[in-house]
């Protein structure tokens, strides 16, 4: 099955700085790569996703890049704000298959 | 309701007892997932249901864990003879159809085994 590794496990940045979280996956057949944000006491919520036919996707302050050859993808958050503080999970899946998650990154944005 | 609903939100049980956790997915979603999240840890895949296909049970940690999905909708995760290491948040998610689709998560059931 798919194996997803995520780094770093914790990340602390100053408000206004950028944050980057990186993930690698093992199964070259994976074609869908979402990112989820989990706030305390809540279930994870999708913030952005990318499919294998594109290399980059952007939504306001959030962007995701995908390198299929290297089997890695990254989340970029620019102009970070305190409300960006949360745990972020990457995931990878193939169609008609299960979704496997990374171990998570705890992001702290210091005001 | 509009989202994935899980019950109970909190469950405290004694070691050795059986527990049942319930998940009501979003209406029309054919795929349903169970994950376990230990304190401060990532999402551990447990089981995946897709339509009428046989479920993917490859993530269940032991034969004390089982899950079923009745009528393609509500799912129940059962843990028999609970152990202290079963203490965690159990998260359910659903999606429209198969993987490669947005997952909608419930708020989870916090299970504490004393």
Image: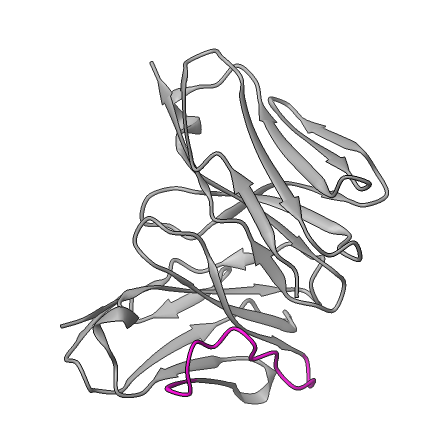
Q: Which residue lies furthest to the right in this view?
A: A53
Going by the image, does A99 lie left or right of B5?
A: right
On the image, the x and y values in percent for residue B48 come to 58, 73
On the image, the x and y values in percent for residue B42 come to 43, 52
On the image, the x and y values in percent for residue B58 come to 56, 77
Q: Is residue B6 above or below residue A68?
A: below
Residue at 64%, 33% (x, y): give it: A74
Residue at 73%, 51% (x, y): give it: A32
Residue range of the region highlighted in magenta in the rendering: B51-65
Q: Is residue B43 above or below residue A81?
A: below
The image shows a total of numbered marks equal to 0
In which quarter of the view is residue A59 placed?
Answer: top right
Going by the image, does A30 lie left or right of A110?
A: right
In which quarter of the view is residue A96 placed?
Answer: bottom right
Going by the image, does A69 lie left or right of A86?
A: right
The magenta stretch spans residue A17: no
In front of the other: A79 or B80: B80
Residue B110 in sight: no
On the image, the x and y values in percent for residue A51 come to 78, 45
Residue at 80%, 42% (x, y): give it: A68
Q: Is residue A47 above or below residue B62?
A: above
Image quadrant where one finds the C terminus of chain B:
bottom left
Q: In this view, does A82 lie above or below B4?
A: above
The chief SS type of the magenta part is loop
In front of the other: B33 or A22: A22
Residue at 61%, 40% (x, y): give it: A23
Q: Please say which color scheme the image uses.
A: one colour
Residue A7 in sight: yes
């Amino acid at each position: 099955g798919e194996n997803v590794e995520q780094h770093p496990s914790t990340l602390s940045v100053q408000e206004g700085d950028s944050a980057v979280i990186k993930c690698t996956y093992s199964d070259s057949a994976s074609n869908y790569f979402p990112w989820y944000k989990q706030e305390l006491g809540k279930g994870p919520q999708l913030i952005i996703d990318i499919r294998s036919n594109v290399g980059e996707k952007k939504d306001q302050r959030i962007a995701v890049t995908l390198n299929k050859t290297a089997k890695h993808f990254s989340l970029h958050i620019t102009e970070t704000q305190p409300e960006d503080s949360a745990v972020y999970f990457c995931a990878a899946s193939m169609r008609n298959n299960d979704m496997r998650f990374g171990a998570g990154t705890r992001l702290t944005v210091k005001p | 309701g509009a989202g994935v609903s899980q019950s109970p939100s909190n469950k405290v049980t004694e070691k050795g007892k059986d527990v049942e956790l319930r998940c009501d997915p979003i209406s029309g979603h054919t795929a349903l997932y169970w994950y376990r999240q230990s304190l401060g840890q990532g999402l551990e895949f447990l089981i995946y249901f897709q339509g009428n296909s046989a479920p993917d049970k490859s993530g269940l940690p032991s034969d004390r864990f089982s899950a079923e999905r009745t009528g393609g909708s509500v799912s129940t995760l059962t843990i028999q003879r609970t152990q202290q290491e079963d203490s965690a948040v159990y998260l359910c998610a659903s999606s429209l159809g198969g993987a490669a689709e947005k997952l909608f998560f419930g708020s989870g059931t916090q299970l504490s085994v004393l």
